[in-house]
Image (cartoon, helix red, strand yellow):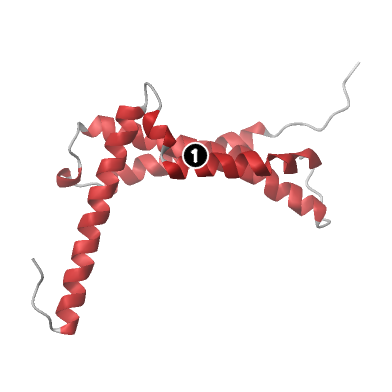
Amino acid sequence: MTAEHAPLMLWIEGLVALGFALAFLLHAFVAFQPQHVEHHPARVRIGALIQGMTVGLAFGFVMLPLRTGYMQFRGIDVPGIPYISSLALLPAFLLLWIIRRGALLKAPYVKNYLRAYRRASLLKAKDDALKALAKLDQIEGRRASA
């Protein structure tokens, strides 16, 4: 006997989560210069991988089913995606809110890696902002600010 149920397409969600994790890792390799990394570079890259996996899991397993559920609602048939995926809306916003508030920076075992990645990304953002301000000062003919 075979059970009658819609097949789960977990490989798609898994690939989305893996893609986000690899994109964050690639960004950590390419974008961060040595002056941005105050910790060991491996710690920053592991933090980027963890952060990317967290965001990827949110998008792959929550947002993607929501989108395909909405497509079914609009009349576009996507086989294998149940309508019940729309129940994930509240947990999706809760997860994104938790990520945005920085609650993962207090999580045991991963907090050191995530803090190292967060510090490197903030130092990079600060460096980019100072460069943009210097360019704007040059365009406006102002003296360079300290």
In this rendering, the answer to whether 60 lies above or below 8 is: below
Q: 99 left or right of 45?
A: right
Residue 16 can be seen in this image: no
Q: 64 left or right of 31?
A: right
> Is residue 65 or residue 130 the one in the foreground?
130
Q: Is mark 1 on a helix, strand or loop?
A: helix
Quadrant into which the N terminus falls: top right
Image point 41% across, 44% down: which residue? 23
Quarter occupied by residue 100: top left
**Number of numbered discs:** 1
Image point 62% across, 33% down: which residue? 11
Which amino acid type is shown beneath numbered disc 1? Ile
Image point 15% across, 78% down: which residue? 138
From the top left corner, tell me how far across and down residue 85 is, in percent: 73, 40
Residue annotated with mark 1: 98
> Is residue 30 or residue 102 the one in the foreground?
102
Q: 46 left or right of 68?
A: left
Quadrant into which the C terminus falls: bottom left
Quarter occupied by residue 37: top left
**Residue closest to the far bottom:** 141
Image point 42% across, 33% down: which residue? 104
**Residue closest to the far right:** 1
In this rendering, the answer to whether 129 lies above or below 5 is: below
Residue 68 can be seen in this image: yes
From the top left corner, tell me how far across and down residue 81 is, in percent: 76, 40
From the top left corner, tell me how far across and down residue 17 is, in percent: 53, 37
Quarter occupied by residue 59: top right
**Around disc 1, counting alpha carbons within 10 Å, would you say few (fewer than 14), some (14 to 19), or many (20 or more)?**
few
From the top left corner, tell me how far across and down residue 30 is, in percent: 28, 47
Q: 12 left or right of 134?
A: right
